[in-house]
Amino acid sequence: MLHVKQLTKRFGASHVVRQLDLSVERGQVRGLLGPNGAGKSTTIRMICGAMTPDHGVVEIDGFDLSKNPDEAKRSIGYLPEGAPLPSELLPSEYLKYVASMYGLTGDDRKRAIGSSAERCDITTVLGKPIAILSRGYRQRVALAASMMHKPKLLVLDEPSTGLDPEQSASFRKLVQETADTAAVLYSSHHLSEVEETCDVVSIICNGRVVVDSTFQALQHDGARVVVEVSPHKIVDEINGKNPSELDSEWIRCEVDISTKSVEVAGEKISQQVASAGGKIRLLHPVSDSLESTYLRYIHEAESQE
């Protein structure tokens, strides 16, 4: 549904997005993670046609955004960061205006507004001025507007800002339901939020994609086992790292897991220890938290600049 190739953007001497590749398929919720200033919002603005890239291709539903902008943009629903809304309007008035922009009129417009308002739980505030709505309600009004024309690609930039825990849970369910018929790109710098909502994740740092993975694979990254072996020389036989001498006989170390099965890895280590004539008294699987893995990738990317 969305295919981005070699996307690049400069602002003066600053290279904000660098040859970025990204794709989101129908039925998929892709998280876009990265620290502030990583290039997430700039990437999203280029995908939505609000900003022109210096180089690269954005293709939406088979249409090149630069060559067929009208066709490509018809497929997009966009919720920008901060959900900017005209405070002088009622939500009902704003939704009518947005629906008209998408070519919806008459009964079609009425049905679209009603369905979107109900899905986003804003029916009780449609007649209240946007100016007096809470931040959470304003966010949901903006979300309703972005979904009203049943987009094939839904692009969300920091979408849960201002939502309380109950609203956030309801919102995540809504996003996942939307992915049944659309591709969803979900940008945030909140790791737990993206993990709970998305199927796959791209991590951006300094304008580059440094990770493109499923959460399952990302969580496995950095998995290892802690072992206690004797004699000390066995550490070298099993490629142990971070050795810590416990006493004159036993030593503790870590061994990276090259397979997703802890059982298989443990059996292999035990066999290596036995073949080397050693003994093993502890074998305990551990893994980095998702946050630690994320920070490791970010620090590695920043150190390479």
Image (spheres, rainbow, N blue to C red):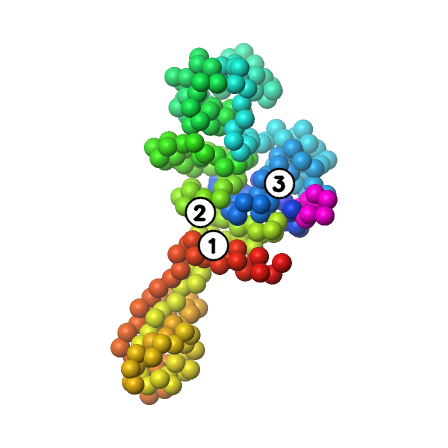
- With respect to residue 304, does 125 lie above or below? above
Q: Which residues are magenta?
A: 5-15
In the image, 215: left or right of 13? left
On the image, which quarter does residue 226 sit in?
bottom left
At 63% from the left edge and 44% from the top edge, which residue is drawn?
Answer: 4
At 46% from the left edge and 24% from the top edge, which residue is drawn?
Answer: 138
* Residue 22 at x, y percent in the picture: 59, 47
* Residue 53 at x, y percent in the picture: 70, 41
Whole-angstrom CA distance, mark 3 to mark 1, is: 21 Å
- Quick one: 157 or 258, which is closer to the camera? 157
Residue 294 is marked as 1
Circle 2 crowding by C-alpha within 10 Å: few under 14, some 14–19, many from 20: some
- With respect to residue 134, does 161 lie above or below? below
Q: Which residue is mark 2?
A: 191
Q: Which residue is mark 3?
A: 42
Visible in this render: residue 257?
Answer: yes
Q: Is the Cβ of the residue at disc 2 closer than 8 Å to that at disc 1?
A: yes
* Amino acid at dot 2: Leu
